[in-house]
Image (tube, coloured by chain):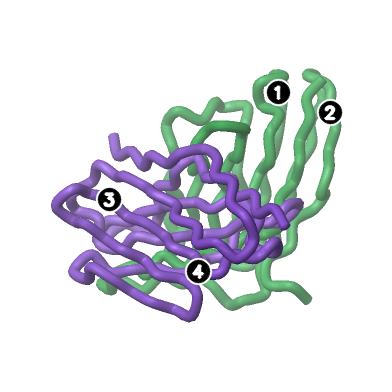
């Protein structure tokens, strides 16, 4: 079956950049996503990238996609304490209205 | 009203109880989902109701039973659960168009935290 793998934990200092990495196995993925889950809350879509793109920038967020290596990353510039959350990588395939999620990466931002 | 509302937020039940989780979406979407979130595991898709069809993950035990009476409401009926079923159960909704690529924007509720004793 399809797998989405992420590291479980990342710790950075406020003001630094954070890079969260993800690998996936499904070569037919059409969209790849980053969701954010704050404590006590459900998941919220942060950004997504279509599989024929290799980069997408949205304010402090930069998504990089290496389709050959099936590697996705999320870079958060000038990380703030409010960015502390769990970040989930997910993918979907054409024709399926469901997502496959990773285990999530807990980002801890210290002052 | 928030987009996707789940009740109860917390539930403690014994293994012989019967209970239900409820989800309501106010976004006019036509697809609803149940996901299970356990520590250190990927989010697990349990059930999908999309375009009036039900899709289920065959690995979900029969002690979990979904019900979707209309496009705005979704239930998860729980019966004879096990302690390993303790988890956060997340409901989500989306808009799905026939023949169109799914853009993957799911709108999640805050979850129902279930503890089975």
Looking at the rendered structure, the secondary structure element under dot 1 is: loop
Q: Please identify which colour was used for chain A in the image.
A: purple
Task: Give the residue pinned by disc 4.
Answer: A77
Task: Give the residue pinned by disc 1.
Answer: B81
Q: Chain of mark 4?
A: A
Q: Chain of mark 2?
A: B
User: Is the Cβ of the residue at disc 3 closer than 8 Å to that at disc 2?
Assistant: no
Question: In the image, are marks 2 and 1 on the same chain?
Answer: yes
Crowd around label 1: few <14 · some 14–19 · many ≥20 (10 Å): many
Choose the circle earlier in sequence order: 2 or 1: 2
Q: Residue A85's spot in the image, x, y percent?
A: 64, 54
Q: Chain of mark 1?
A: B
Q: Is A37 placed left or right of A34 in the picture? A: right
Residue that lies at the very extreme toward the left in this rendered image:
A68
Crowd around label 4: few <14 · some 14–19 · many ≥20 (10 Å): some
Query: Viewer-proximal residue, A16 or B24?
Result: A16
Looking at the rendered structure, the secondary structure element under dot 2 is: strand
Q: Residue A74's spot in the image, x, y percent?
A: 42, 60
Q: CA distance from mark 4 to mark 3?
A: 19 Å
Question: In the image, are marks 3 and 1 on the same chain?
Answer: no
Q: Residue B99's spot in the image, x, y percent?
A: 25, 72
**Residue shown at the point (33%, 68%) measured from the top left:** A49
Looking at the rendered structure, which numbered label has been put on residue B13?
A: 2
């Amino acid at each position: 079956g399809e797998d989405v793998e992420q590291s479980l934990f990342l710790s950075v200092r406020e003001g630094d950049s954070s890079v969260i990495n993800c690998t996936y196995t499904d070569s037919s993925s059409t969209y790849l996503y980053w969701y954010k889950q704050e404590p006590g809350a459900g998941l919220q879509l942060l950004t997504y990238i279509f599989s024929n793109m290799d980069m997408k920038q949205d304010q402090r967020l930069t998504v990089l996609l290496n389709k050959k290596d099936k590697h996705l990353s999320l870079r958060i510039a000038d990380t703030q304490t409010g960015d502390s959350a769990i970040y989930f990588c997910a993918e979907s395939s054409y024709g399926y209205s469901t997502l496959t999620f990773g285990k999530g990466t807990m980002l801890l931002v210290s002052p | 009203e928030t987009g996707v509302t789940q009740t109860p937020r917390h539930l403690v039940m014994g293994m012989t109880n019967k209970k239900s989780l409820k989800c309501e979406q106010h976004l006019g979407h036509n697809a609803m989902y149940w996901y299970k979130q356990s520590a250190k595991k990927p989010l697990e898709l349990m059930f999908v109701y999309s375009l009036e069809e039900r899709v289920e993950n065959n690995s979900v035990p029969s002690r979990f039973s979904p019900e979707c009476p209309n496009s705005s409401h979704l239930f998860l009926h729980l019966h004879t659960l096990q302690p390993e079923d303790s988890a956060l159960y997340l409901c989500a909704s989306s808009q799905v168009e026939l023949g169109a690529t799914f853009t993957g924007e799911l709108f999640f509720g805050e979850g129902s935290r279930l503890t089975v004793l």
